[in-house]
Every structure is written in C-alpha cells, then in structure tokens.
Image (cartoon, helix red, strand yellow):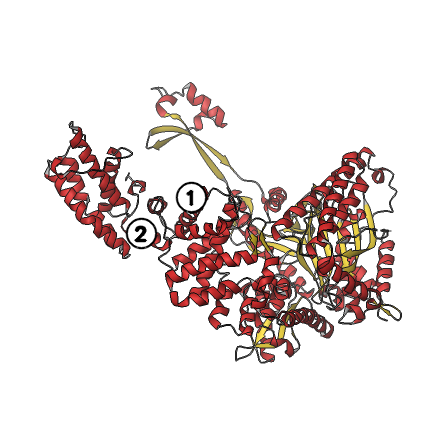
Amino acid sequence: MTKELLLEIGTEELPATVIEPVLEQMKTGAMTLFREQSIACNTVRTFGTPRRLTLWVPELGTQQTPTSKETLGPPRKAAYDENGNPSKAAIGFAIAQGVNVSALIIRHTPKGEYVAAVKRHKGRVTSSLLPALLDNYMHSLSFHKSMRWSSSGTRFSRPIRWIVALYGGRTVPFAYAGIKAGTTTFGHRFMSSHREKKALKGIKVKDFESYAKSLEQHGVILDQERRRNMIRDKINAAASNHGGTLEYDESLLSEATFSVEWPYALAAQFDPSYLALPNDVIVTAMQEHQGFFAMISKKQTLLPHFITVCNVEYADMGEIQRGNERVLAARLADAKFYFTEDGKTSLEAKLPKLHTVTFQKHLGSLHAKVERIETLVMYLARLWNPSEEQTCRRVAQLCKVDLVTGMVGEFPSLQGVIGREYARRDGEPESVARAIAEHYYPRFSGDAIPKSLPGAVVSIADRIDTIAGYFVVGCAPTGSQDPFGLRRQAQGVLQIALAGYTPLSLRDLVERALDAFQPTLDFNRDKVLIDILGFLRQRMESTCGSEGYRYDLVRAVLERDTFDDPLDAMHRVTALQRVASDPTFVDLVGAFKRVINILPDSPPNAISEALFSAGAERALYAKLQKSRSQIAEHLASGEHTRALSLLRSFKEPIDRFFLDVLVMAEDPAVRNNRLALLGQLQSLFHQYADFSKVVIEVEG
Amino acid sequence: MPKLSFQDIILSLHRYWADHGCIIVQPYDLEVGAGTFHPATFLRSLGPEPWNVGYVQPCRRPADGRYGENPNRLQHYYQYQVILKPCPDDAQTLYLKSLTSLGLDPCHHDIRFVHDDWESPTLGAWGLGWEVRLDGMEITQFTYFQEVGGIALDLIPVEFTYGIERIGMYLQQVDSVYDMVWSDGITYGDIHHDSEVQFSTYNFDDADIEMLTDRFCTTERESQRLLAKGLILPAYDWCMKTSHIFNLLDARGAISVTERVGYIARVRALARGCAAGYLKDREAKNFPLLKDNKLPNSVPATQSQ
C-alpha cells in the first residue's frame, strides 16, 4: 500500500542561485531517508520557485518493510557442547542480543562456523513516523549562507512562513521553526491578490494534482522546467518580433527561471545613440546589473532592444516597461559620461596617473609595477619571439591604465576590456589592444588563456611580479590562507606555460623579478627565491594531480632541484605515466632502488677503469659513458619517450652488475670505484626524474 | 493622485510607520555614511529589548559625489530608515503597504525581492535580505540583521532603508534628481546643487590629507579613551567621526587598496567596543525597555500572507 506525500516549504523570496542546489538536496535527501527507514518509494520529485520548495512522493509505502538484522556470535565450537547444549557463551550472547537461545542459528563463514542471532523488525506505520522524519528532513537542508528570523532560532536561507504537509490527504502533525504544518498554501504575491482578494487568506490543498492546479490559477507555475521553457519561448518570440535574436548564457536563463513564479517576457528599448558605446559595456550594464537579455541583429550587431523577464502579467505593462527602460538609461548615461570623459586623453597620457594608485604599501605604485612588468616582458619576448618585442612592451606599458578610468571605476568587471576599447580608440595596433584585454586571462581555474603571444607574455610577467613582490614583503600564502590569491596567480602562469610557452626557466624569471625589488627593499634573497620556487613547484604538483597524473610520478619529476620548465616537466610526467604500469618499467625501478639503497649520501665520484675487474662492471660503465650525452640530447630535443626507453635498457646491465659484482669489496679502492660507478648511474637517471620516488605496487 | 513631492514622501512614511507603532525619531547630528550608523539602529539592535523606530537620516558618501553633474549620484542624500525589532512575521506585507501609502500600488508594478547579502565591514554587521526593485529600480534595502558590532543578535531586527530620492524621481517621472520637486516651487536642486558642487570639490580635490590623517588617529584615540571609561555613547560619537574621516581620506584617494582593510579594521574595533559596552550597560540596567514595556506595542502581526 502506498499514499501520496506532499511537503511544501513556503518562504520569503529565496535567492535565485540557492533554489536548484536545495532541490537536489531535497531529492537525494528524501530518497536516502526513506531507504534508510525501509519505507518504499519509487519516485521523488522536487519543485521550486522563489517562494516555495516542494517535495512530492506520489507513492510512499504506508508501512516500513519488515527487516531482519543478523549478528555473528561466538564460534560454534564454543557455543555448544558435544551434546548440543548451549554454553555460557551462547546464552550470554543470546541475552545480549535479546533473542531466545534456541533461536540462534549457525552461519558458515570463511573463518569457520559461528552462531548468529537474527532480530526481526516488523516495521512501523509511516504516518506515525513522518512527523519526526519531516522535522529531521527539514533540519538537514543546508545553505551556503543562512539566517535566523524568529525566537525558534531555526536557520534557513530566508524566513519560512508556512508549511504544507499532507500524507494520503491528511495533515502530517509537526511544526518547524515554530510553524505548524497544515493544508493551506499561498499563491503569487501580486497576481493572486490581483485576481481575487480572498486568495490572500490562502488556498486549501487536498493533493498534489489540485495543489499544482490551484497554484497555476493563482499565478504560480510550480515546475521549474516548465517555467524555464516558457521563458525561453517567450523571450525568443519577443526577440523575433523585433527582428533580433538573443545571445545569452544559460546561467542568465536560470536566474530568470528562479526569480519568478509567473514569467512574462517584456521587450523594451534604449536610445540607439548609446550604441556608440563599446558593446561589452552595454551588455554588462544589462546583464550583470539587471538580468536583462541583450538582443542582436542577424548581422551580429547589438540592437537597441532588450528583454526583461517580469514576475507579473497585467493588461497594461507600459509603466513597468518605462521603469525598466529608465533604469537602464540611467546606467548607460553614466557609461556614456565616462566614455566621453575618459576619451579626452589617451591611455598613454593617463599613464602617469598610475603613480597615484598604490599597488601595495611596500611595493610601490601601479606605475612602478608596470615598469617591473615591462622588464620581465622584454626578457620573455626575447626568449620566445624577438619580432614581437615592441608589441609586448607597448602592452606592458598600457595594460593597467584603464584602472584609472571612470569607466572601470563604474564597471570593475570590465577591466582589460575597457583598456582594449580605449587602445583601439587611441589608434594603437590591434595586436596591442587585444593583448591588453587578454593579459587578465586566465581569471579563474579552467578559464581560457591569452590567445596571442603578447597577451601571454604580459600575463605571465604580471603574475610573477605579483607573486615575487608579496613573497618579498612576507605575504606568502600559509596553510589555507591565501588572502592575495597568489595560488590562482601561480596557476595562471603554469596554465599559460603548459599551453606551449617553452623554453621557460622559472628560476631565471623569478631571479629577474627579484632584481627589481633588490634596490629598494631589504629581504633575504636566497630564502625568498627558494620559497617562491618551492611554491611554484607545489602549484605544478597540484596542476598535474588535478589533470589525473599519478602523484608519485609527478613528485619523481618535480622534486628534484632541477624543476624549472613547466612544459618540459609535464612532458616528462606524461611519458613516464605512459610506461609506468609496464612490467619492464616496474623492474627497472626495482633495480634502480637497489642502486639507491647501497649508495651513501655523497658517493665518491672518481672512476678508474683500471680498477674494474668484472665484465658486468665494464659493460655498465661503457653503456653509461655512451648514454650520458644521448639522454641529454633526447631531453633537450623533447624526446622524453626515447630518453625513457634508453633508461629502460639499463635494466639488464644493472641486474647483471648486481649478480656478478660485489659492490662492498674489501679493497677500499675497488669498493669506492664501484660506488662511484653507481653514483654516476644515479646522476644519469636523475637527468630524467628521481625514480626512487616512484611507488611500485606489489600485487596481492 | 497628484504626484508626491519629496517632502510628502517623508511625511507619508512618517505617518505610515507612526500608525504602525514606530517611534519617529530625528536624524542623528553627525556625519554618517548610512542610516544604520544612527544609534537608534546600531545600538538599539543589540540585546533583547524591543524597538520600533522610523527616521530620516542624511547620509554622506564623499566618494559618490559627481560635482552636481550626474543626475543620479550624490555625495549627500537621504535615507528613510525603519527598524522593527523583533521582526514581525508579516514584515514584507507591512513594507509593501508602505509603498501603497506612497501611491505605488504593488499590483500595478513589478516588485521584486532580489537577494542581497548585506554587510558593513566598518560596523562589524551583516544580515540577509533583499534589494527591493520597483520595475527594475532598486528602491529599498531590506535586511534581517544577524550580527551587529560583531555580536550575534538574539532578537532579530528587520531594517528597511528606503532610497527616497529614487522613489521621488520615479513618482515624479523626472530623470534628474535635481529636477525633483521638494515642495511647491522648490526643487531638490535648489536646495542641494550648490552643496554637491562644493563638497565634491572639497572631498576629491581639497580635503587636507595630512590634517585628516592626524585627525583619524585623534578621534580614534578619543573613542578608545571614552570606551575605557565606560562612556559608551560619547565613545560611539567618536567612532562615527572616525568612520567619516576614513570616508573622506578614501574619497581623496589617500588610502591604497591594501591600507583600506587596515583602516576599516580600526573603525570596526571601535564599533565592536561600543556594541559590547552598550550591551553590558543595558544589561546592568536590566534592559529597561524590556521590563517597563514603555514602548508602543510592537507591530501587530497580521495574517502572514
């Protein structure tokens, strides 16, 4: 037997972004709850609007399914004597389990035969359990940010104002946050009362079907997917009425879906003269601040129309339309004011203003930062493409100037974009303009990286300067504390480098960054350098780890004092991972670990061929001599797989060596000679990675 | 219905909230950045004493000045502030009816409660609620306070902060705040345009940085001295003055982004001290408003929807 469960949590307006996650919580929470309680339920559905969160279980078992729980007791031998009489142990166990000793059964286990007690539960009636269960259930819902509003002290995203809880058409008697669950819901805040005043007193609910139907009559489309589709259809229709199409992010549509109970797409317009503003400014003013949908023509140009999704639908929407238009007009008027004001001087002319903006108390002004960026940029440009040196330098000089414009003051999220637009207006080369916007990329993990070389160069230089500067003044991240977002900055450097910017020596780059602080600041240069390189290495480890590489392989490659070029390191890890589970590689690592184990911390390094006695010794030495330069060449030319297979060919000679040769010979000269040979072998392997860090999984 | 003048809006809100059990108090006589600074909000929100109040608060935000050239931006403007403590169950309904009293029928407009996590780092205060939008325009900040002066609140107050210039501009359908009718024949511009020009010039270009930097330390010290003596209300006055001097220095561009955090923390330390001191003092007095029940009855809870 099953009955329908309906729970509606009536709230004041929930933030649009919390509704979807909490509906998911409600769904999985209900399924887990009823499973744990052994109450049958097939389907669980959840619905949400700004003012209600609804759980619907069409078929919920009226009774817990009977369960039985088995507990193992003492071994059979200890439980019964040879006549089959229960021992003290068996009687004690039965008492502890609350079963009759005669009810104990025997279970065969891999460890032998044991007695077991089986406890059966016939199951309680669901309706008697629901009050406590629903109370716990509501308590389990969590929000990123929650608040208190009443003396109950209950926390929720926003105040709860009513609760409907029906099981099989009857009220589930419980109270939450001081509110008694009942059978009365409320319709749309405005549409409902607009239609009939008595709706204010609430709507009686019998079951889900009548509930959803009455809500719709009172201005509420309960099902979010229906609302989403309605909005999509309505805004598209409204756009095509104006000969346009819409280009928007799904998150904007979601925001609209969870901001309204009764969607209405209202088309409105702005003065076409504002189209002279950069499109990004207009779109940002519309989307970020108002949640408006921007409209574009078939030629992909912005139209002076937009769509706003209202929460009401009246015969005359004129006043609402004019209101929305005036809000946007005020913002665009602001933008236009700044666009004109800012345009009175070029970016270059504004450059000195950066003197007045402090980057960091001890690290000087933004102007000083730009000068430091410029030095690093010149170094990187020469390294990667000297023909773009001048472009890179120009980008470095202008990349921060938009921060002192009125427009960025008004629309901070447009930093870089405004720099690009103003550079274009100033007649700067397009490559310069574009790279100004690009140098802020990647803005977050997973974001795009700069498309052009100048953008990448300036982005890396800017970030390395910031990291170096904060380390110099003692503001390095500690533990989970990273108040200046240096980890993100480092991640950005690595993400760009890994996209193909090589060769790159992080050590050289950081050294140069530190040079810039040396004249004015007093700091322990050696320590800061080591700290920064260690920090970058950690970030690299985490980058590789998050891309699914084996941590031991990542460490083998990175935790040498030679980690320097991110892309090269990544190639080494990739090649290593490719062969890591190959049995011959596993054997090689085993052989190498034997070498490591026998070596003292600082092995002797002079080798005299005359002291070799065994053939295996000579063979290993000859191979070593031959391979050293080959490995170096392979690594230099990026042929990591070839370097690796060369190393793998050492497995045989090493095994042979250990078989034929006694390293710890009595004659110290011979002994040291052999240790020196192994020491050189270790150095050879170290050119690639520290193989002793590779974890060999032992099967079984 | 004739269009309400600016002063009509204030008078209507006074009438409405007085009728709903609020004490109507006067603006605080110091420079503040928001109505929340008024002791009738900041201090009275603390502790278990009920408190329902409405008032106008002139606010100064030096950095928002635009030399009188921008039709929507002012360095000096007015907030209409209401505190209902404890927050009644029908706070939203009461608020919406106050709009009706201004001639704004919620059933003819698109009124939205758009989530807003309010925070005042200088006051060590935060709350959750909304910015209320009228046909897309923000007209009110609606906040359930959770913490004030770093102290978690037992009795949750709700704060409505009306942007009355915006409401007036909307009602009068004017695009510039300076064109809004204040009272018959007198516009907002007649009263405030000169001060916007002069104060913008002072705030951005002329304020004496060295003098203000010194003064910041002096007022801070005075507040600390008074706190140590248990003279909480005067200490809070000096806390407000310290905060305003910080705002001036900030507008003048004398404070870098990184220094900012430190300055704010210093003001917040004073605010926290005042909050703790106030609560201690009220407790020592046995929370007089709780016992004597001298306040008008708290706002009657009507049908919750």
Query: Which residue, given by chain and number where applicable, does mark 2 sit on?
Result: A572
Asked if residue A557 lies left or right of residue B16, the reply is: left
Query: What chain letter is assigned to the residue under label 1?
Result: A
| Between discs 1 and 2, the one toward the N terminus | 1
State the image coordinates of residue A320 (x, y, percent, origin top left). 72, 71
Which kind of residue does numbered mark 1 sit on?
A: Ile
**Residue A167: percent from left, percent from top:** 62, 50
Q: Which mark is residue A530?
A: 1
Is residue A57 visible to the viewer in this orientation of the structure? no
- The residue under label 2 is which amino acid type? Arg
Question: Mark 1 and 2 residues: CB-CB less than 8 Å, in contact?
Answer: no
Let me know if marks 1 and 2 both belong to one chain.
yes
**What is the number of callouts on the image?**
2
**Residue nearest the viewer, comparing A115 with A658:** A658
- Residue B107, relative to residue A31: is it above or below? below
Q: Real-space Cα distance between discs 1 and 2? A: 23 Å
Q: Name the chain under label 2.
A: A
* Residue A548, position as x, y percentages in the image: 38, 51
The residue tagged with tag 2: helix, strand or loop? helix
Q: Decide: few, some or many residues near mark 2? Use Cα within 10 Å; few <14, some 14-19, many ≥20.
A: many
Quarter of the image with the C terminus of chain A in it: top left
Residue at the location (51% across, 65% down)? Answer: A437
* Side of A204 where A354 appears, left or right: left
